[in-house]
């Protein structure tokens, strides 16, 4: 394909559009896509996590995670918990996060169903594998598999 520049442009357009659309849908919960990603990480982990671990998982700067976590604390979605290391900040999900989890998940599922409507599983799989290949190359992990 000789349309690499167009592909990069469209990739960023899709990413921005998806982010904006998801943010609009999550506004009723006072959540952004970044905050939702942190909540989903904590749900999967089922334990407290450090901000450094979250930043590594999301592949973002710790300062970005700190801002998102501060807002999550303000909105009572996460709680800060004591750590053995005074330099480390650890958080857990609050009761509020668990209470809204199914409604938030349904909203996210609706968003994904809208975004991927009329796109076959095969097309999604090829897209996923291609994007994963690009991500791994950019991160220097060309042989890494995604979970």
Image (spheres, grey):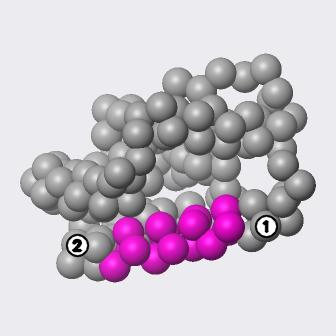
- Inspect the magenta stretch and tell me whether residue 78 lies in it: no
- Residue 121 in percent (x, y) is at 41, 34
Q: Is mark 1 on a helix, strand or loop?
A: helix
Q: In this view, does 14 lie above or below 2?
A: below
Q: Are marks 2 and 1 in contact (CB under 8 Å)?
A: no
Q: Is mark 2 on a helix, strand or loop?
A: helix
* Number of the front mark, 2 or 1: 1
- Residue 85 in percent (x, y) is at 57, 41
Task: Say which quarter of the image contains residue 96.
Answer: bottom left
Query: Measuring 25% from the left and 67% from the top, which residue is drawn there?
Result: 76
Q: Give the range drawn in magenta.
A: 10-24
- Residue 72 in percent (x, y) is at 36, 67
Horizontal side of residue 78 vs 70, given as left or right: left
Q: Is residue 74 above or below residue 35?
A: below
Magenta stretch, overall SS: helix
Question: Residue 6 bears which disc, if any?
Answer: 1
Residue placed most toward the observer, 44 or 140: 140
Residue pointed to by mark 2:
29
**In 3D space, how far apart are the residues under numbered discs 2 and 1 (Cα atoms)?**
35 Å
Residue placed most toward the observer, 101 or 52: 101
Query: Measuring 57% from the left and 73% from the top, which residue is drawn there?
Result: 16
- Inspect the magenta stretch and tell me whether residue 13 lies in it: yes
Query: Measuring 73% from the left and 42% from the top, which residue is drawn there?
Result: 135
Horizontal side of residue 141 vs 70, given as left or right: right
Q: Is residue 112 above or below residue 34?
A: above
- Residue 147 in percent (x, y) is at 53, 24
């Amino acid at each position: 394909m000789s349309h690499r520049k167009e592909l990069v442009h469209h990739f960023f357009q899709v990413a921005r559009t998806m982010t904006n659309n998801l943010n609009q849908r999550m506004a009723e919960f006072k959540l952004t896509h970044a905050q939702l990603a942190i909540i989903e990480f904590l749900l999967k982990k089922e334990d407290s996590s450090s901000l450094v671990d979250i930043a590594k998982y999301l592949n973002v700067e710790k300062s970005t995670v700190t801002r998102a976590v501060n807002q999550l604390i303000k909105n009572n979605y996460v709680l800060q918990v004591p750590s053995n290391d005074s330099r480390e900040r650890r958080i857990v999900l609050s009761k509020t996060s668990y209470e809204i989890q199914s409604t938030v998940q349904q909203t996210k599922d609706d968003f994904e169903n809208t975004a991927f409507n009329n796109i076959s599983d095969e097309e999604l799989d090829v897209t996923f594998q291609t994007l994963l290949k690009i991500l791994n190359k950019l991160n220097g992990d060309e042989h890494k598999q995604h979970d």
